[in-house]
Amino acid sequence: MAMASSCSKKNAVGPSRDNYRFPLATGNTWTYDRHIILTFDVASGIRPPDSTFSSVTVQVVAPEVIFDSLQTIKVREKLEMQEGALTTYHYYQNNADALYLIASLGLPTTLPKRALNSPAGPSPTLIALTHPLHTFANPVSAAAPDSLYLEQPAKIVLKYPLAEGTEWKYSEKNKPRRVNKRVLGEIAVQTAAGTFTAVQVQWIMDFDGDGAFDNNILFIDYIANEGLIKRSFLIQGLPVVDDDGTYIGRYNYHDLSTLTSYKLY
């Protein structure tokens, strides 16, 4: 469901320019194919890639008041994989200036090593990657699975308008890590659900917590009138160790989610 276009600001780029809002009407549903692949470059010889496939369904449930007074929009995310299904909920405010993440319900999810047959060395722990709108919710929380975790302060998922070059702070160091987001230009994206004109929103991250943004991470969301079309998360040069803890090479981790179907109201 496309929205009217407005070009009153010449530097505003986006699916609907200045008046764009992420489509969060009740009942809106998106389904994605998710493919995680690890490619290796190890000293002991060529090792075939490891990969895993799953499906993600995101649905806008309804407006909901939480913590007695916070007006939010409740969104359900369901990750279905061979090992079973995981369901989480996130609560948003879609205001004139930005899309805010207010709270989350459900434990964060961690990449299963056995499912990937990944090396014994360090592998990226991806928090709440079931959600195509925000990533890296608080990874250490005393909240039970049925308890709401309130973001303090609320996280800016998208800053309106989607103007090329706009950059903002998403999270700070130790909360859980330092992340900025930046709007890049438009691009045509082909998916099983069609071809879309999308704005690229880049995540700029200090994943290892050393105080500097990492140059081996390329993390981009592709946002169109119809919502999130594609997400690509690539980490290059992660270490591989053998069973004795000896370094034997490196591997690349690529997590790709692509839209397969959607329904908007």
Image (cartoon, rainbow, N blue to C red):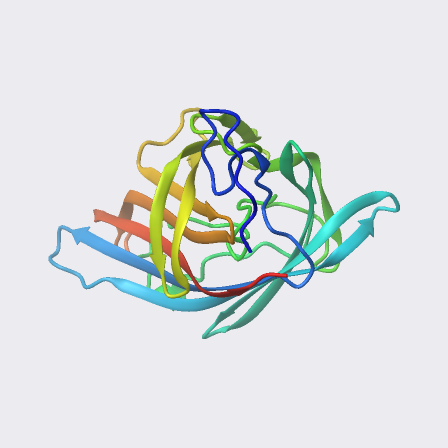
Q: In terms of depth relative to the viewer, which is nearer, 11 or 129?
A: 11
**Quarter that holds the N terminus:** bottom right
Position of residue 213 relative to residue 42, above or below, is above
Q: In terms of depth relative to the viewer, which is nearer, 59 or 172?
A: 59
**Number of marks:** 0
Residue furthest left as drawn: 45
**Quarter that holds the C terminus:** bottom right
Tell me if residue 173 can be seen: no
Q: Is residue 40 left or right of residue 60?
A: left
Q: Is residue 114 left or right of residue 149?
A: left
Q: Position of residue 39 (x, y in %)?
A: 23, 55
Position of residue 195 relative to residue 234, above or below, is below
Tell me if residue 230 can be seen: yes
Q: Residue at x 55, y 46 (%)?
A: 134
Residue furthest right as drawn: 68
Q: Residue at x 63, y 56 (%)?
A: 107
Q: Position of residue 127 (x, y in %)?
A: 53, 50
Position of residue 249 relative to residue 144, above or below, is above
Q: Dividing the picture into quarters, in which one does residue 28 lie?
A: bottom right
Q: Is residue 195 left or right of residue 127?
A: left
Q: Position of residue 51 (x, y in %)?
A: 31, 65
Position of residue 210 relative to residue 151, above or below, is above
Q: Residue at x 38, y 68 (%)?
A: 53
Q: In terms of depth relative to the viewer, which is nearer, 237 or 168?
A: 168
Q: Position of residue 111 (x, y in %)?
A: 45, 58
